[in-house]
Image (cartoon, rainbow, N blue to C red):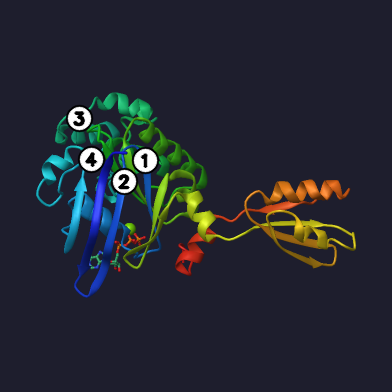
Amino acid sequence: MEQVITVEHLRKTYRSVVAVDDVSFEVQRNEIFGLLGPNGAGKTTTVECLQALRGPDSGRIRVLGLDPMTEAQEMRARIGSQLQESALPDRMKVWEALDLFASLTPGATDWESLMEEWGIADKRNAVFSSLSGGQRQRLLIALALVGEPEVVFLDEMTAGLDPAARRAAWDLIRAIRDHGTTVLLVTHFMDEAEHLCDRLAVVDRGRIVALDSPQGLIEEHAGTIRLTFSSDDRDLSWIEAVPHVSSLHRRGPKVEVEGIGPVLVHVAAALANHDIIPNDLRVEQPTLEDAFLAITGRRAEE
Ligand SMILES: Nc1ncnc2c1ncn2[C@@H]1O[C@H](COP(=O)(O)OP(=O)(O)OP(=O)(O)O)[C@@H](O)[C@H]1O
Ligand SMILES: [Mg+2]
């Protein structure tokens, strides 16, 4: 595996505020790596240090083998950054923005084809302020890709989008990766991190408190799978002996079974063997939200 980003013991303070405190992680080529955490956790500060937009107090950073502190110019030619929406003038047209960025970016690609690819070609003469949220997002991503970057940094790119536009943005991010670009994504949305990231670091109060694949975090931290169904059978205590079952609770006809791993298949098969065919069998899988809560003691969107 080739490491595209290496961060060792990064620390950044703003006067008395410790924004980033001893953060270390690595990002491999062609992965979608996420920084997930609540407001103020230090995510933006971290990616700003990586992009040479801020100088860290201490620590070692390499992006594509380059040191942002001393080789920023060379590095900038090989990375792409998603701009904040406010960074574009309202009256600027779509094609003008792309043309301007291309003129500022060494080795810029043909932006006409980027416009096609990101579905904004029919908006080429539209001014920025007239674009919908999703169209703005597409333009901002296209601008980040103008220099054919090897790594892109996307900070809260789906904030403010409606659910459909967010899903569309996820597809766009996957498409960036499928082009061979490594993606470092900052988000505080659980579903986004869970569906999109290959691996993610959970950041809380300036520190990384967990780092794994979404599934790995869920399995390690989120606890059990819960099955519920209704049954009038008097004795169901045999369910406790079914493989992977950890507990059984009953409240009248309502039965609740907790377990891990392939508990659903085992319980369903055992019920069928006992001629119990509930038509209201439900499964509650633990989510990344549950894992996050277990890791940090609070919800990310709080
Ligand atoms: N320019 C600054 N001057 C002083 N303090 C700052 C500055 N930028 C950030 N901070 C502080 O540093 C901490 C980390 O902020 P940062 O923006 O990195 O968090 P974040 O994880 O990106 O949060 P959010 O999810 O709200 O974007 C916060 O306590 C914030 O108030
Ligand atoms: Mg931020």
**Above or below: residue 178 compared with residue 128:** above
Q: Earlier in the sequence, mark 4 or mark 3?
A: 4
- Residue 58 position within the rendered picture, expressed as x and y whole percent measured from the top left: 17, 62
Q: What is the spatial separation of the Cα atoms under label 2 and label 4, in whole angstroms? A: 14 Å
| 237 sits left or right of 153 in the view | right
SS for tag 2?
Answer: strand
Residue that badge 2 annotates? 27
Classify mark 2: residues with Cα within 10 Å, few (<14), some (14-19) or many (20+): many
Q: Residue at x 31, y 62 (%)?
A: 42
Q: Is residue 168 left or right of residue 23?
A: right
Amino acid type of the residue that numbered disc 4 sits on in the rendered structure: Ile
Q: Which mark is residue 206?
A: none
Q: Amino acid at mark 3?
A: Ala
State yes or no: discs 2 and 1 in contact (Cβ < 8 Å): yes
Q: Residue at x 33, y 34 (%)?
A: 126
| Number of the label disc, if any, that sits on residue 31 | 1
Q: Is residue 94 visible?
A: yes
The span from disc 4 to disc 3 (Cα, nearest Å) is 12 Å
| Secondary structure at numbered mark 3 | loop
SS at mark 4?
strand
Nearer to us of marks 4 and 3 is 4
User: Which-is-in-front pick, marks 2 and 4?
Assistant: 2
How many residues crowd around disc 3 within 10 Å: few (fewer than 14), some, or many (20 or more)?
A: some
- Eye-nearest disc, 4 or 1: 1
Mark sitting earlier along the chain (2/3) = 2
Q: Tags 4 and 1 in contact by the CB under 8 Å rule? A: no
Q: Which is nearer the N-term, disc 2 or disc 4?
A: 2
Label 1 and label 3: CA atoms lie apart by 23 Å
In the picture of the structure, the residue carrying the numbered disc 3 is: 108
Up the image or down, 15 lies above or below 183; here it is: below
Identified by mark 2, the residue type is Val
Query: Which residue in the protein does label 4 denote?
Result: 79
